[in-house]
Image (cartoon, rainbow, N blue to C red):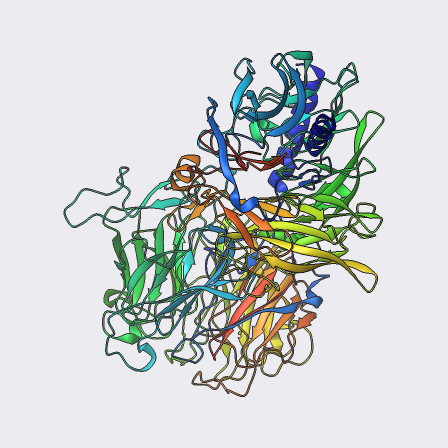
Amino acid sequence: MNSFTRKVSIQVAISLVVCSAALPQGRPLDWPSLGGDAQRSGWEKVDSRITPENVKDFQLVLKRKLENTEKGPHSLTPPVVIGLLISYRGFKELAFVAGSSDNMWAIDADMDRVFWHKHFDSAKGKASGPCSNDVTATPALLPPVNFAARPRPGAPGARPTLTAPPAAGAPPASPTGRGILGAGGFGAPRPTFAVSSDGKLHLMNTSTGDDVVPAVAFLPANAKASSLIVVDGTVYTTTSPDCGAGTGGVWALDLNTPDAQVASFPLNEGSPSRHGGVAIGTDGTVYVQTGPGSLDPGSNKWANTLLALAPKTLKLGEYFTVSGASGAKSPLNLNVSTPTVFTHNGRDLIVTAGADGCLYLLDSKSVGGSDHKTPLYQTPPLTKGAGNGIWGGLSSWQDAKGTRWVFAPVWGPVNSELNLSANGAAPHGSLVAFKVEDNGEKTVLTPGWASRDMNSPLPPVITSGVVFALSAGEYDKDGRPNSSSRATLYAFDAGTGKEMYSTGNQVTAPGNLTGLAVANGRVFFSTTDSTMYGFGVYMER
Amino acid sequence: MRRTNAVIVIAAGCALVWGAEWTTDGFNTKRDNWQRDEKILTKDNVKNLKILWKIKLDNVPQEMHSLFPPLIVEKINTAEGPKEIAIEAGISDNLYAIDVKTGKIIWKKHFEYPTPERRGRPDDPLCPPGQTATPVIGPPNAAGARTVYAMAGDGQVHSLNVANGEDVAPPFKFGYPNGKSYSLNLYKNTLYTTTSQGCAGNPNQMWAVKLDDPNHKVMTANPKSGGLWGRSGAAIDSNGVAWAPTGDGRYDPEKQTYGNGLIGAKVEGDELTIKDWYIPSNAVWLQKRDLDMQVTPAIFDYKGRELMVTGSKECRVYLLDPKSAGGANHQTPLFRTQLLCNEEADFQSAGIWGEMASWQDSKGTRWALTPFWGPAHPDFKPPLSYGPVTHGAVVAFKVEDKDGKPQLVPAWMSRDMDQAEPPIIANGVVYGFGSGENTRQAYADRGLADKSSERIKASTHAVLYALDGETGKELFSSGDQITSFNHFAGLSIANGRVYINTFDSVLYCYGLPGH
């Protein structure tokens, strides 16, 4: 190799390396599901756009009122986000939001424009009350591709492609025999997954909103499906037994199978959290926390229990039941939370909230111990009193020193017995933080901090050492918002709970009880007047 | 005697009428695309343009590339006498010398070399193999001979006698095989080019080599970006600074990373060094949406100072001072226009592509012109326009002072053109063309799927236009006369002839019959 060629080769290597890293303030990030990942951590691990230094300069960067017929605390889901879609109309960052009136929107997150809108033409049932026709499930995306890993098609992390399902009796459409989701590969279209009120699963072209394949029968109609999650080509969600006989359960639809088989774990009592539904362990185990009711496994009544189900088949593995829990239900579903899963010392741990308002730390190797009632650790109740409790779900983050934190949104004053480091009086509610620590041979949840006062806090999202939490505004015990109250987004130092930012009076309605998302320098949430908000780092256009 | 003298005077006068050449892409080293010496074609007669001749060359297209803007040089002493010659380069390593009077080939050269190890992915329009740089013709030597410098697909520069195609010097290495070099520029005996898209592993950078350096040391300046793909390579200002857009990429001056901007590099000694740069203040946005800076600027004189204009896929035009392109922070232009097009912020089929143009009319008004693709922006409303623009147009600005600072004032927007390409100007007439190229790269059902074969199939045909330079009014259209499209080609004009070529390797010569 002569000097000219050698010099060129070196420069080529440099330019290729540089070009691969050349992205605006970090690579485009996806937020593919409620909580950001299958473990429902709420933690965006790599968004370099947000820093503790710049969060104070957050601006309103998106405000888009969407035409959803129904208003109220579940009118819009939080978005799931594709950080970069090379669409037929250009490079886009798209936020996909479901509306309770059988709507789905794709919003151009940079330009604050509706990119497309679809209305599900679903057959309406005659359900009334809390299960009236509404779409409640946050949509989901396939997890982002890990280019470095180059997974086998069908393996966790693989990006399957799509083919139409075969007609009845016909051979599989895909030459691989893989059904709706075929072989993997770069450049394949990325669908967004959504459920309409008739219980059908839609795989929607992210560029147009068109169904990529005909909608697939998945759930009972009008059954308050919780947020979707897609792992290894299988879509998971839960439905509520409160919507009628036979409507409750945990559901799995394996899109890798030629005929898109549905598996279910019936729940005749013990409604799961409507917020997140399931959390998935790193080994694929499906964890779901049920709510009040009676415990009678033979009748599929699993109240106040954390279930550990096998991936895809949903066969029961282990379970943990909170002893002596109350059977009283609340419209707000307090103390029925989506658990969060994380790895600690080489194994999955699960944190869930019990009906008694305590946090329970469980070991995936033996979820409830031999008696199904023994956790690794139990905190005191986070709050006390009727109408108070933990709402929606839990979040988790690991700091730069390797310490794992767990966050819980608490409605009502925090129990003083916890000795949390306070950031001012918090009579209405707050976000509380615990550290996961090893105390001798035991792993415990050590009280950390409680935030400033918040009205109806939602499960937070975390990035770059900053916790973003939404105070949704005033809600009564029946889950009805005070329309004159306002949602406020806060940013807290994740290690201390100190307030770093507040949206003040910029938001003009109560927050929806559906959740937050964080991606590409922005935090998103919605309000009861069907408006989607984004606050974040300003980008000049 | 008096009659004979009169004939002599008339003949001499006619000889003086001639004298226009087009020896480099973009007309000159500054890439202003303004043919100053055109005397034959006027606003009044250009409507009578006809195809004087067309010739199908035996050049094989590669991906979507075929022929490049022809270079025109006159008074070449050939074996058959003095001729005005068009030097036409083809992607498949072909160089043709064509008698512009007859449309006949005088000589042809094909560059032979072992097939390089690497080439771009087949069916990928981004990295065609072969000769991709429009050549350049040097000034006459003492004997009046002219040399054309052409860079073959193996990266070797050939120096050929324009009269007969013979080598006048041994070839020397200047680039990487199949490395996609852009148009050569020749400034004070130094050749410049730029490269992009990392084709065949080639670095994306600016290149320079001194013709009189016996070692032909290759000098490079690398902005660490996605590619310097301005259509006519680098434009060189009067101080010898070569300016080129850097395409996609990050901006991090501490790491000498100048993506999404315009760099100026200068040869000092035997090094090519980046001296200055301009990065738009919304570079993060440009990168996020792939709206890169990728337009060769046009450099021109304005009231005693030198200025330049460039553009981006975002569809803005920037007015810059080459002495300090972006001011102290490198991000402050003299002027930046509103969005002319691309309301969708699309990376394909929209925005400004290629190169700019500039001319000064007889009243002393300085003009700057840009093409753009796609629909006009709904908020862009120039004083003169000619119907809805949905596929592309040429926009003309006047350069005027306001509060002591130069700015670009919109004057007119042309009629709709199917993918409007960079215009050229001659004698008060703007010549533009719609390439007819299908420029789609992404699809609703497939996402990004940029394939030469599909785009070629979906392309239509080019149309040549002549417009009044002061109003933009259409004076001529070739209609359906040109039967194929072109891709990354260009126009040339000299001595009453306008040249345009197409994907099917046909070179068209338009002119006025009898002139």
| Residue lying furthest left | A169
Assign the N terminus of chain A to one quadrant of the image: top right
**B428 or B3: which is nearer to us?**
B3
> In the rendering, at what x and y percent does residue B100 appear?
57, 26
Residue A533 in sight here: yes
Instruction: Give the quadrant of residue A209.
Output: bottom left
* Residue at (39, 38) in percent of width and height: B454
> In the rendering, at what x and y percent does residue B251 appear?
70, 47
Assign the C terminus of chain A to one quadrant of the image: bottom right
> In the rendering, at what x and y percent does residue A33 appear?
45, 59
Residue B187 sits above or below residue A49 on the image:
above
Residue A130 sits above or below residue A539 on the image:
below
Q: State left or right for residue B115 relative to residue A155.
A: right
Report how many numbered discs are placed on residues in the image.
Answer: 0
Instruction: Give the quadrant of residue A504.
Output: bottom right
> In the rendering, at what x and y percent does residue A522 appear?
59, 63
| Residue lying furthest front | B1
Instruction: Give the quadrant of residue B236.
Output: top right
Q: State left or right for residue B192 relative to residue A490.
A: right
**A475 or B454: which is nearer to us?**
B454
**B409 or B173: which is nearer to us?**
B409
Residue B256 in sight here: no
Q: State left or right for residue A494 relative to residue A267.
A: right
